[in-house]
Image (cartoon, helix red, strand yellow):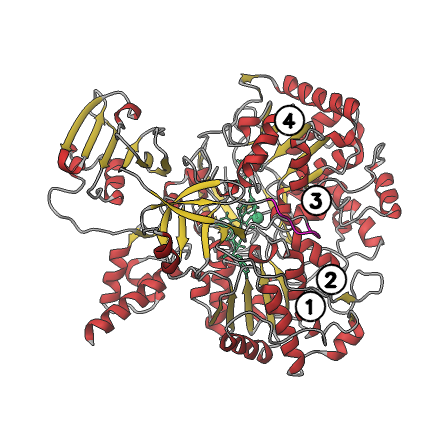
Amino acid sequence: MSAVRTTCPYCGVGCGIVASPTGPRDVAIKGDKTHPANRGKLCSKGTHLGETVGLEGRLLHPMIGDSRVTWDMALDDVAARLADTVVNYGPDSVAFYVSGQLLTEDYYVANKLMKGFIGSGNIDTNSRLCMASAVAAHTRAFGEDLVPCTYADLYAADLIVLVGSNTAWCHPVIWQQIEAARERTGCKLVVIDPRRTETAERADLHVSLAPDGDLALFNALLAEMAGRGKLDTDYLAAHCEVPEGFIAGLDAAAHGIDPAIFDKLAELVAAHPRMVTVFSMGVNQSVCGTDKANAIINLHLATGRIGLPGAGPFSMTGQPNAMGGREVGGLANMLACHLGFTDDERAAVRQFWNAPNLCSGPGLKAVDMFRAVHDGRIRFLWIMATNPAVSMPDAMYVREALARCPNVVVSDVIADTDTTRFAHVRLPALAWSEKDGTVTNSERVISRQRPFFLPPGEARADWLALCHVAQRLGHAEAFAFDGPAAVFREYAAMTALCAERGKVLDLTGMADISDTAYDALEPSRWGGEHPLRTRYPTPSGKARLVAVTAPAQMPGLRLNTGRYRDQWHTMTRTGLSPRLSAHRREPLLEVSPGDAAVIGLVDGGLGRVTTPAGTAVFRVAVSEWQAPGHAFVPIHWTDAMASSSRTGALVVPATDPHSGQPGFKNVAASLTPVASDWRAFVLSRDPVLPAAPYWVRSRIVGGWLTEVQGVGEADLQAILPVGRFSEVRDAARGMVRTAVTAHDGALLALAYVTRTGTLPRRDWLVRQFAESAASLSEMLAGRPARPQPDAGPLVCVCHDVGENAVRAAIHDGSDTVAKIGAATRAGTNCGSCRPQIARLIAQEQNAMQEAAE
Ligand SMILES: Nc1nc2c(c(=O)[nH]1)N[C@H]1C(S)=C(S)[C@@H](COP(=O)(O)OP(=O)(O)OC[C@H]3O[C@@H](n4cnc5c(=O)[nH]c(N)nc54)[C@H](O)[C@@H]3O)O[C@H]1N2
Ligand SMILES: Nc1nc2c(c(=O)[nH]1)N[C@H]1C(S)=C(S)[C@@H](COP(=O)(O)OP(=O)(O)OC[C@H]3O[C@@H](n4cnc5c(=O)[nH]c(N)nc54)[C@H](O)[C@@H]3O)O[C@H]1N2
Ligand code: SF4
Ligand SMILES: [Mo]
């Protein structure tokens, strides 16, 4: 098969990819130079997609319980469960919980089935956990869920303010383009984040603030701009509704941060009218997330910094198709296509769909939906393309809810996830590389995801499984789509209902697109470059400033949660990649040195986090980058990958009153050290399951690396594979090292235990294990017999360059990231490690300077 142009399945940047299959499940991945989102660039996750498209762990057949069944049996069963539940308990006793990782076509069909034909508003999506506050803020300010910017604005701006966004890790291609713009134009960069991140480290100004301090900060900034005469009074008068006394009521002193930092920020903002404010989860995931987003939008409206090249508030989307889901109406509080639930809108939708049972109003939002499952109001739940047993707040409660629910259907690509464990029926979905449809990225560009592998086993498109159930429920005609293009045509035609009501979402130009034209569809943006400047889709035609009040600061230690550069969510895909797993092999509890000292946490030890919702254990990393009073843990680890490092178990289900979005980033917590008697790690071909209180596993070439820590006797023998055991012991230090080989001498496993000593270097052993290069005695020694150059911890995953090579190049005179790239190749492919290289340069230069003094 020749090269196929498709779109990356990870983040909302929506990078174009050229995929060239090289075997039945092998593919070479390149950035698509013609795609407007990335112009050929890819980050580490996109670059290494090839390592995640194998069939390992795939769900290949429909399953009822543990029995493989035919699609017909599974679909009959799902339809019967759904129909029975509706007959006995009414339409609101069933629900769909879907995902921003579905295609627009999947989403459209799911929404149509639930809201139009089953007759309940109970379809919500994991975008509730992600974008709901931005959606609510857009709707309050603009009258429609509209992102008023495009990536081009980032290159036209003189000042970029990143609020609650670790762009270098989470939207890396945007980050690379921001860095390029800074080099070209000298554009200034501000990062507002309680933590110092690799993004914050590279900024002209890092504003560290209290959790949820953004509201006070942006209100104060607006007052300060008013005081400095920087408001655009003409724009305000002509195009905005301003609440009585709003601006006069703001306090320029109540910003809650160091006054010198505030002054610097105010100077930058005052001096640069071409300003883009990018915001993501540090804003949205908060019990005041909608207000925070409106505080940002208020500043832009009042200074007229919107709808012009290089100016606007820019909500960056998380998932590849969170935007598509918002467009078709996948949130419980939208009806369809940017339409709400007024009589007029409902009548229009009823007519368009010819819907017999149009729902009467909004359904339950995610957190409330799982509450209703828990208390038995919802008795049928179909989960698609999301892993709520991990990613929902108060995940233990969510698990209880799933365990109690009499009918759980899960559509996934993976057979065994923390969520599929609760499923009565599992339906095998098509994965990226097989799926066929469209997604919309952060800048409203619709792109095609195209298949380049045949569906494995009996996997089927999600939209098709939905149609087959709809047909069994008696709605054959309304769900007779013969392909994704047919679904897309209907959706595009339906946007006429928005356009007729003065809204911007309008795809009617594509309502008649032929199958061939759909197949060949080039990336296309709806709404144009700047849909909002002089006319807003509100009744008055004006934008609305919204008066928002800063919350009181919460006392005590606060837990913040977020992402790592090379892992995606619950690791069902990135966790398969040895290269991506090398960046962070364990989930870290990051705490400030002061807090660590007081609590007794030591760097490299274990720490327990306890919140009102639950508890989890992580490896401690004492870090100057954490502000005192804040701790940070990653969201990615599940029960499939670790003994007890699930962050979802820690988050309380408090939500924003406007958006229903949970406050994932500001949770009261206490920390305690965890003592252990011994520490170990195991390299094995197949996963091992230690009976120890702490273990974490990660992918390596040719197997798994499992870190283990425990109390009492260290008995790892029982979990090692059957074979010939070779052993080295040192009783004094409680050291045991074991190698297990097969009869033909092939290495099966290595295990290293110590009670008081140190363990050998993992990275060297991981390489030997992959290549079976070193001798058995060298491996038991944990080092080569004759010393060899040591690469050190991996920096560049693409070109396999270690820290020591980078440091050596710095000593040889390479003093910029570009020069390091020329000398070592590090950072020259995906560029995700460039912030890390910059930090190594600064470190080495400091060290050299100190040595010279
Ligand atoms: N590598 C990687 N990339 C991803 C993803 C992934 O899983 N892995 N997921 C994708 C998805 S779905 C999403 S939603 C995006 C998320 O992308 P981001 O929003 O960039 O990611 P997070 O790490 O969740 O949070 C961003 C930052 O918010 C900060 N923050 C916490 N509280 C506050 C606060 O009160 N105020 C401010 N100003 N900042 C605060 C955190 O310290 C953190 O550094 O990433 C997308 N891209
Ligand atoms: N504590 C804390 N929790 C968080 C967050 C946080 O910052 N802190 N962030 C929240 C955010 S922003 C998000 S977006 C969520 C993400 O959380 P989830 O949506 O739960 O995360 P994923 O791991 O992406 O789950 C996607 C699932 O869908 C499957 N899948 C992939 N493609 C397809 C497909 O085409 N069809 C089907 N049927 N299945 C598919 C995958 O195998 C996987 O099991 O987590 C949220 N939870
Ligand atoms: S920035 Fe990375 S993860 Fe996001 S779409 Fe592009 S390649 Fe994929
Ligand atoms: Mo997200």
Q: Amino acid at mark 3?
A: Leu
Query: Mark 1 and mark 2 in contact (Cβ < 8 Å)?
Result: yes
Q: Position of residue 818 (x, y in %)?
A: 35, 65
Sequence order check, earlier mark of 2 and 4:
2
Q: Amino acid at mark 4?
A: Cys
Q: Is residue 255 left or right of residue 135?
A: left
Q: Which mark is residue 298?
A: 1
The alpha-carbon separation of the residues under discs 2 and 4 comes to: 39 Å
Q: Which residues are magenta?
A: 653-659
Q: Residue at x 59, y 52 (%)?
A: 285
Q: Amino acid at mark 2?
A: Ala
Query: Mark 1 and mark 3 in contact (Cβ < 8 Å)?
Result: no
Q: Is residue 361 visible?
A: yes
Q: Is mark 1 within 8 Å of ligand 1?
A: no
Secondary element at tag 3: loop
Q: Amino acid at mark 1?
A: Asn
The quarter holding residue 834 reads bottom left
Q: Is residue 589 left or right of residue 662?
A: left
Query: Mark 3 and mark 2 in contact (Cβ < 8 Å)?
Result: no
Q: Position of residue 96 (x, y in %)?
A: 68, 34
Q: Which residue is mark 2?
A: 141
Query: Mark 4 and mark 1 in contact (Cβ < 8 Å)?
Result: no
Q: Determine crowd level at label 2: few under 14, some 14-19, many 20+ residues with C-alpha closer than 10 A.
A: many
Q: Is residue 495 left or right of residue 420?
A: right
The alpha-carbon separation of the residues under discs 1 and 4 comes to: 43 Å
Q: Which residue is mark 4?
A: 405
Q: Does residue 851 lie above or below 654 as drawn?
A: below
Sequence order check, earlier mark of 1 and 4:
1
Q: Principal SS element in the magenta part?
A: loop
Q: Residue at x 34, y 29 (%)?
A: 690
The alpha-carbon separation of the residues under discs 2 and 1 comes to: 8 Å
